[in-house]
Image: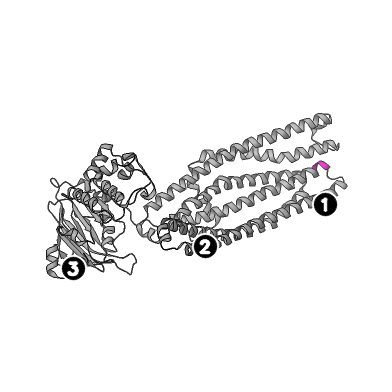
Amino acid sequence: MTSLTSNKNNKNKENDWGLFLKLLPYARQNLIPLIISFILLIPISICGAIQPLIIGESVSLLQKEKTWSFLQKLPIEKGLQLLVIILLSSILIRLVFLALQGYIVQKVGQEITAGIRQDLFNHITSLASSFFDKTPVGRLVTRITNDVEALGDVFATGAIGIINDVVYILVILITIFSLQWKLALMLVLMLIPVSALIIYFQQQFRIANYKARDELSKLNSMLQENVTGINIVQLFRREQFNSELFRKVNNRYQEEVNKTIFHDSAVSSTLEWISLMAIGGVLWLGGNYVLENTLTFGTLSAFILYSQRLFNPLRQFADKFTMFQSGFTAIERITELMNEAIEIEDKQETLSLENLDNENNLELKITQDANGFYYAKNQATKQGEIIFDHVWFGYKNDEYVLKDLNFVIPAGQKVALVGPTGAGKTSIIRLLCRLYEPTKGRILIDGIDIRDISQTDLRTYIGVILQESFIFAGDVKRNITLGENYPLEVIKNAAEITNVASFIEDLPQGYDTLLRERGTNLSGGQKQLLAFARIAIRNPRVLVLDEATSSLDVGTEKLIQNALDNLLLERTAIIIAHRLSTIRNVDQILVLKKGELIESGSHDALLIQKGLYFSLYQLQMLGS
């Protein structure tokens, strides 16, 4: 989809036709059903247009006025019977074709809706973490559900329906002009003011509808936030305060919806008034022609029916136009989301870490030049070497949280990151996993810039266990494999390696036990145990632990520590730990403060320096 500026700002609006064209790529995938539905418009419109003519001829036949030539040769009773048969046949044909067309159109609409929803979901899940930092979850939910549904209605009910109405109106106009052009012209002239009013009210509806959907997004965001944080809401007695906030947003949403209802109702009442005026005009002018013997009763009767049928499609058109306005608003909002740039993308040609062979390939030995920048020399190395080469990073362009980080983690070493809150420890992990891109500098793994590695390979190569593990709705097996195909024996082996097999086997259905959303039927420690099994089954070369054992009790932590000793063998490990007593035996400790690396060395060496690490260690020892 192409870029769109929000209608909310009322600047550089793209016209409705331009918005509608954005649906065409999805419509082309269902071209044959659409062609069939268009072909069905012809018999539907013709059957609808001849019905007033048949009724008019019946009146003329009863009045013994001039009728169709084949009717004049028949007795009145036989002629009426024939006209009734023709009328019923046209009604039946129209109903059958309308039902068939409705089914086809609804099916195509659902196909288009599903395609848009899938593309939108794929795009959202490809966006960088920085996008989700600034976008409420409820807003995304609104766009992928309500907005996409409104967009589907545009095609399923609106687009084909409007074409149907237009064809029907054209057939009626051709028919009435062939009957009596003066009466037909009067009806056409009445269409001009009603069309202008419809356009005006629909423009106002469009503006109100955009605002209403924006308020609905805020409503969903607030609802999602309160449901997710219900424990904090209740513990701190914020129910009444949050209820008042929700009431204000709810009232604003109601006010905007009321505006859409007003403009929609104005269109309906205008059409009703104009249609009654049209019937009155036909009776007045047509009655004069009947008195002058220039028009038959039958033709006048047909014109009265045509005046009703001419405005019925307009009324339906107005209803569909309202739907279109909702759909166009949805297209704008969805396009805004689809237009969000995917900041982190793989290059067309990427290097694979899996192809590195320590025995057969020369790897890159990293050396610093005179300016402090790293360069590579050919030399065989172990897999798992990590380099931060003058890395700067900020979540905002002018606010750096990491400043000129320059360090090497040799392959197979265990390195700990320590420092006060806000020092940048978690940001280092996010950059290493390429959830964010460095503002300046580069990060290398085994001598390869991580931007030259596919994200799939990189995140298979690096295993991360966070402080809080996320559990998906599903069984235990799927929460370990996360959608990948592993035999049950491999799953059980990963669980045994990480000492979590006994916990899983104690569950009601073992590995087939269903877990609720966010793992609400597990304890915090049990959720973390599953996270260790997820990593073990993937056998990564680099292991990252972000306070991974903080939610475990002493007994469980001991089991996990034994499992970690196995997992850490021959692997590079980065450990974020606030309890400094747990990292005494690592090979190297990197001490961070305000995004800068200020100390590095072993536990004993850092204590001798009596710098920041020494101060933090002393504070923890006093506290314990």
Residue 355 location (% of width, % of height) = 20, 46
C-alpha separation, residue under disc 2 versus residue under disc 3: 50 Å
Residue 408 location (% of width, % of height) = 17, 60
Is residue 26 a member of the stretch shown in magenta? no
Which residue position is annotated with label 2? Answer: 249
In the image, residue 493 sits, relative to residue 138, either above or below, namely above
Q: Secondary structure at mark 1?
A: helix
Number of numbered markers: 3
Which residue position is annotated with label 1? Answer: 284
**Residue 284 seen anywhere in this rendered image of the structure:** yes
Q: Earlier in the sequence, mark 2 or mark 3?
A: 2
Residue 520 location (% of width, % of height) = 37, 50
Which image quarter holds the C terminus? Answer: bottom left
Name the residue at 34% across, 67% down: 397
Q: Is residue 132 left or right of residue 616?
A: right
C-alpha separation, residue under disc 2 versus residue under disc 1: 53 Å
Residue 170 location (% of width, % of height) = 67, 46
**Residue 73 seen anywhere in this rendered image of the structure:** no
Residue 502: quadrant of the picture: top left
Which residue position is annotated with label 3? Answer: 618
Residue type (three-letter) at the residue carrying disc 2: Val
Q: Which span of residues is magenta-colored? A: 294-299
Q: Marks 2 and 3: CB-CB under 8 Å?
A: no
Name the residue at 45% across, 63% down: 238
C-alpha separation, residue under disc 1 versus residue under disc 3: 102 Å
Q: Earlier in the sequence, mark 1 or mark 3?
A: 1
Work out whether residue 253 or residue 212 is closer to the camera in this orientation and state it: 253
Residue type (three-letter) at the residue carrying disc 1: Trp
How packed mark 2 is, by other alpha carbons closer than 10 Å (few <14, some 14-19, many 20 or more), is some
